[in-house]
Amino acid sequence: PGSATHDPARTVRAARGNVRTAKSWGAEAAKRMLMNNLDPEVAEHPDDLVVYGGTGRAARSWEAYDAIVRTLDELEPDETLLVQSGKPVGVFRTHEWAPRVLIANSNLVGDWATWPEFRRLEALGLTMYGQMTAGSWIYIGTQGILQGTYETFAAVARSLGAATGSATDSLKGTLTLTAGAGGMGGAQPLAVTLNDGAVLIVDVDESRLARRVAHGYLDEYTTDLDAAVARVVAAKDAGEALSVGVVGNAAEVFPELLSRGVPIDVVTDQTSAHDPLAYLPVGVAFEDWKAEAERDPEGFTQRSRESMAAHVAAMVAFQDAGAAVFDYGNSIRAEAKLGGFERAFEFPGFVPAYIRPQFEEGRGPFRWAALSGDPEDIYATDRAIAELFPEDTALHRWLEKAGEKVHFEGLPARICWLGYKERHLAGLKFNEMVASGELKAPIVIGRDHLDSGSVASPYRETEAMKDGSDAIADWPLLNALLNTASGASWVSLHHGGGVGIGRSIHAGQVTVADGTELAAQKLERVLTNDPGTGVMRHVDAGYEHAKDVARERGLNIPML
Ligand code: NAD
């Protein structure tokens, strides 16, 4: 929808190497990461400026994109560019410690924060949907979500093991059912097979399944449900790791598998349910999707919610039958409830079920990209991380598997979960490696907005907080302000990412390791303070483990 001028002839690819055309590495890195977000290897729909997550865009229009690139090239090292929902709106004199770019995406005043109002304003060309790392220029392809998904399925395996009394952290001999093989959801099949399980993934869009196979995230796919079921059930029985995609609508396939009594152990979903226009309802042909959604958005939303109600009803029935079922952060429970299914919230979200203990330590999806474009730079950083954290066996296992299995998309990048008083060690080490010439060009260090201190999202990251503070959104604002004050290279503040308009407020930061002493000072502060806000947020909500972390690692909390 809206304002992006369609320009299919254009292919965007970030420059590689250690020669910059911008006047600072902060501006050069922002420009390259914007371009990297739109690289056809990285973006799901680059012609429409859509990076991932339904309609998550990197810039409001191609005109705005060109103006951002031009401005970043001209920007002085003591100036800051302001970007308002994907459009460059002003350049101000600041100072060298200030961010080179400040970004605000998709923000609306509370009473106006609805999809219809957002779409009205988007159609007028006044805003865009920034998702989390689309509009803040630090999306790194499907790997970005792979590690978190891998960790979540490992936690699912441990809880299944605990339930059956067998201490295991593998999914061997189990069958997982999910849907949505898009930019984020496409990580699910590989995350399950890395945990040694079998998985069936449903998507209405055959091209998404083909793309996951091409990139090594999915073993195979078919249009024949019977054949798919036979393959995955045989793999489960044999204890083999196998991922199979099937082309179909989850709102039909999930109930069908339930009625057939297929022996499914784990059920989740990552269709783009947060945006009812990005979820295909039953009865609308795949080819008519876009036209139907544009013709009658309200009617389409209603049909889409009704289909989600059927989809979620099947998920609850799988839970009734003994499967482990969880919401994977796409707001499908809330949409299904709006579609008339009252029991939608009977299964939990993945954060309270599996992730919160990590957030209490300020742990979350730390990531970095090599501006050299050389995969060897990432392999060198992998080794450095392994040496920095010799005790963390899960981290070592991840780095090893990622090194083998992850196909780089766009600039070579890596992700791993690190916490408070860990991330800055990595940042300082990378900066030293740039300074010494061990790495061929600067490293860009950022994270997802889905982090421990940077998001308020009551259906996802802050679901079921201990003190009931789920919807308090002061925390991500403080996080963005603190990162700005600490020396980040660009800072972003968004609304609506992950779970949709009206349901979240979240912030991001990216800081460049260019090998200078100034970069070391900035990295030390940003990469300490940023995860520190996660520990602070969980201390404030009353989590005991967070309090221990704060005391042990020396975080100053005035009222603790
Ligand atoms: P995407 O838009 O790239 O992919 C969504 C996929 O769902 C598409 O391939 C689409 O064809 C498919 N789909 C739509 N309707 C369907 C239906 N009825 N049946 C089967 N398939 C259908 O989105 P994405 O980036 O993969 O994100 C997916 C969802 O996960 C979003 O809601 C996003 O906000 C959420 N998300 C979760 C996390 C997390 O950590 N859990 C992180 C990021 C995003």
Image: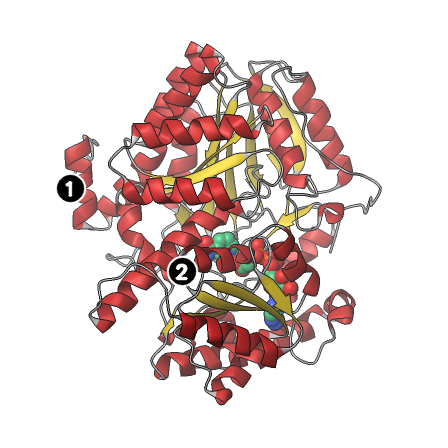
Residue lying farthest to the bottom in this orientation: 259
In the rendered image, residue 277, in percent from the top left (x then y), is placed at 65, 65
Q: In this picture, is 351 found above or below 484?
A: below
Is residue 285 among what the camera can see? yes
In the rendered image, residue 149, in percent from the top left (x then y), is placed at 43, 54
Marks 1 and 2, how far apart at CA: 34 Å
Decide: few, some or many residues near mark 1? Use Cα within 10 Å; few <14, some 14-19, many ≥20: some
For residue 39, which numbered disc appears in the image?
Answer: none
**Label 2 near label 1: C-beta < 8 Å?**
no
Give the left or right position of residue 457, taking residue 277 as reference: left
In the rendered image, residue 381, in percent from the top left (x then y), is placed at 44, 28
- Closer-to-camera residue (477/461): 461
Residue found 50% across the figure and 40% down from its top = 493
Residue found 70% across the figure and 50% down from its top = 45
Question: Which amino acid is tagged 1?
Answer: Asp
Asked which secondary structure carries label 1, the reply is: helix
In the rendered image, residue 287, in percent from the top left (x then y), is placed at 78, 69
Question: Which amino acid is tagged 2?
Answer: Asp
Task: State ligand 1's quadrant.
Answer: bottom right
For the N terminus, the image quarter is bottom right
- Closer-to-camera residue (537/239): 239
Residue found 41% across the figure and 75% down from its top = 237
Residue bearing the label numbered 1: 548
Q: Nearer the viewer, mark 1 or mark 2?
A: 2
**N-term-proximal mark, 1 vs 2:** 2
Residue lying farthest to the front in this orientation: 238
Residue bearing the label numbered 2: 196
Asked which secondary structure carries label 2, the reply is: loop
Q: Is mark 2 within 8 Å of ligand 1?
A: no
